[in-house]
Image (cartoon, grey):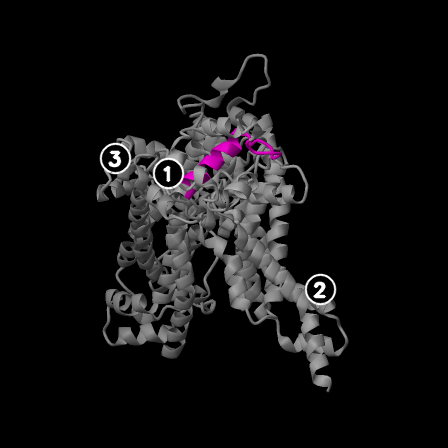
Amino acid sequence: MNAPTSRLRKWLRGLPVHIILIGLCAIWLIPAIGLLVTSIRPFQVVTENGWWTALRGAPGQPEYSATCAECHGPDGKAIAAADLSDPEVVAQFRRSFALLVVLQEDINGQPHLGSKAVPTEQQAADLLDYLHILAGTATYTNFTTNNYQDALTGYRGTTSYSADCAAGTQPPDINCNLSDLANPRGMARAFLNSLLVAIPSTFLPIIFAAFAAYAFAWMHFRGRLFLFALLVGLQIVPLQMTLIPISRLYSQLGLNGTFWGVWLFHTGFGLPYAIYLMRNFLGGLPRELFESAYLDGASHWTAFYRLALPLSVPAIASLGIFQFLWIWNDLLVALVFLGGTTPVLTYQISNMVTSLGSGWHLLTAAAFISMLLPMIVFLGLQRFFVRGLLAGSVKG
Amino acid sequence: MAANTPFVPASAQPKRARPAADPIPAVMRQKPLTPWLYLGPALVIMTVFIVYPALSTAYLSLRDKTGEAWATARCVAGAACWGIFENFHYALTSPIMLQSFANNLLWIGLMVTGTVGLGLIIATLADRVRYEPIAKGIIFLPMAISFVGAGVIWRFVYEYRATGEQIGLLNGILVALGGQPVAWMSTPTVNTVALILVGIWMWTGFCMTVLAAALKGVPTEILEAARVDGATEWEAFTGIIVPMILPTITVVITTMVINVLKVFDLVYVMTGGNSGTEVIANRMYTEQYKNFDTGRAAAIAIVLIVVIVPAMILNVRRFNAQEAAR
């Protein structure tokens, strides 16, 4: 008797929490959903209306319903003498003003549209687009993958890559075959460049950091603590402070615009944090483990290679993922040391923002391409961490 | 993701602070040269890429535009001159830099309050629901993407049309509610606040994750006892939870202050520092790579580090104290 009401009351008491949480999650997600929806809409409508109207249908349909549907019918076939679904009839109106002229003419002494308002030029243009769809001389879908094709190949024409290639009117830098994926303006090439930058820049610092961290954790030498404290201090130096001298140095060495330049820079800058993290992890390993290995005749090299490295896989994995995402998402270093010679994803997008302005169909697709890998890494990484932790605790 | 986040994933947390006595077993003594073989590459790279540039920047900040003469040469006759510190004269008193300082202050005020406040609210509330991992995942997701990607997402939300149908979400809502569209990105102050909101969207997940870990450490017995004694949820939150995780809150705040001071990508992508949105880090980039003025850029970099260092020291101290207390 009492149970349902108390459950209801409990549910009601929890309601504000759910409303706040779900509301916040919605606010967090909606901007990203807007990006995703826009990236799969046909480019003609992206700048016409908001992405939240994506399911509204073809542009011109509201105008058609308001102006023509009453007499010509929803499919345009109601008046046999003026069948709007006939391609030949629609072909008479090359431009929208030709359509406008016909609409303004009288039919049998009566205005064509009766008491309805004559459409504006913009409305007439949308109307004509819709007539083409009715007549089957144009097609319209709510969603398309064309924007991704255009972004990946670096297409900058006025229609779309597939349409231009089908008509043979592609811009000079497009070949309409697989080689377009290597177009320096395209996101496919930038994706590859980002990988080429990020992978060595992730491995190099971790390798060097592992060696140094082992020395800090398990070797005797003078000034060990002092050096380590110095190293912790180096983490304070902001990236911005090192850019100017290094780019001056690089221009003397001819390293500006090369992969080696970026790899080395990311290595140098990632090292203090990597060593700090690795040393703390290695130092936390049980000393008996190393002691007994030594008593069994192991050298430092064996202890490092056979013991320390395998045991620190969880630390290396989390460090690697952190460093990889950092570099993948970095704009400043890529901008300064690579620039336009080897554009990475972030550079390419920031460049498109300035050069395209409102080319939203391309920008949104490009941005989504750049986010794909981090999202996969992030979503996959969480589970990996839990597993690594469990494995570590089982092994003791 | 901003540089040098002291965000330590759970699995990489150091297990325990080492005892003060030398913990390295005596049998592990090695030849005096061996450690330097292990340390060598890392030390050389760090010297070239961090120590040398830091010192060089300090020197360049006292030189002229191209670094060929002392900055004194830049002084204009009849105007106030700071001698060798002429670049700092610019970095500390020029109108554009004063604007940057003001904007960075606004960034710190709004973004730190926003991220830490929201992070704390979400961490506390998510603790009570069954869909906790999903909610936290959604809030954390923006941390995985770049500032550039976030810039595109939010530029689109803020898109403005003087006439015709609005395609930006925010103006779409405004117009649907019967209001007038706002040019979010070109109206001074409004645009800085709009940029800060993007920062909050990106960084709340970080604060939430760190604070959530601290919240899990609050013993449930104390909370139960307080509730038995008749404390309301709010009293338990302000009287027990917040004081107990205060050290973590301080670390999160200082970390956010550092991140906010270094903010560059967002401003660069969304407004380029125009229309009154300039910040220190973007100004440094503009001076160096658009005006090719090494002296001024270096001086701004020095100003930036001087502002950051206190927060950094505070952070490292707090972090170490916390580690020692575990």
Q: Main secondary structure of the magenta part?
A: helix
Q: Residue at x 34, y 66 (%)?
A: A313
- Name the element at disc 1: helix
The dot on residue A168 is: 3
Q: Is residue A101 visible?
A: yes
The dot on residue A87 is: 1
Taking the image as shown, residue A261 lies to the left or right of residue B221, namely left
* The residue positioned farthest toward the right in the image shown: B230
Whole-number angstrom distance, CA of label 1 to CA of label 2? 73 Å
Of B173 and A44, the residue lying toward us: A44
Mark 2, other Cα within 10 Å: few <14 / some 14–19 / many ≥20:
few
Q: Is residue B310 visible?
A: no
Mark 1, other Cα within 10 Å: few <14 / some 14–19 / many ≥20:
some
- Quadrant for residue A181, please give it: top left
| A45 is higher (above) or lower (below) than A7 | above
The x, y position of residue A127, in whole percent, is 49, 36
Taking the image as shown, residue B287 lies to the left or right of residue B227, namely left
Q: Quadrant of the C terminus of chain B?
A: bottom right
**Closer mark to the observer between disc 3 and disc 1:** 1
Q: Residue at x 56, y 72 (%)?
A: B130
Whole-number angstrom distance, CA of label 3 to CA of label 2? 69 Å
Q: Which residue is mark 2?
A: B238
Q: How many marks?
A: 3
- Which callout, 3 or 1, points at the residue further toward the start of the chain? 1
Taking the image as shown, residue B14 lies to the left or right of residue B246, namely left
In the rendered structure, which amino acid carries the disc numbered 3? Gly
The x, y position of residue B15, in whole percent, is 45, 69
In the rendered structure, which amino acid carries the disc numbered 1? Pro
* Badge 1: chain ID: A
The x, y position of residue A225, in whole percent, is 42, 57
Q: Which residues are magenta?
A: A112-134
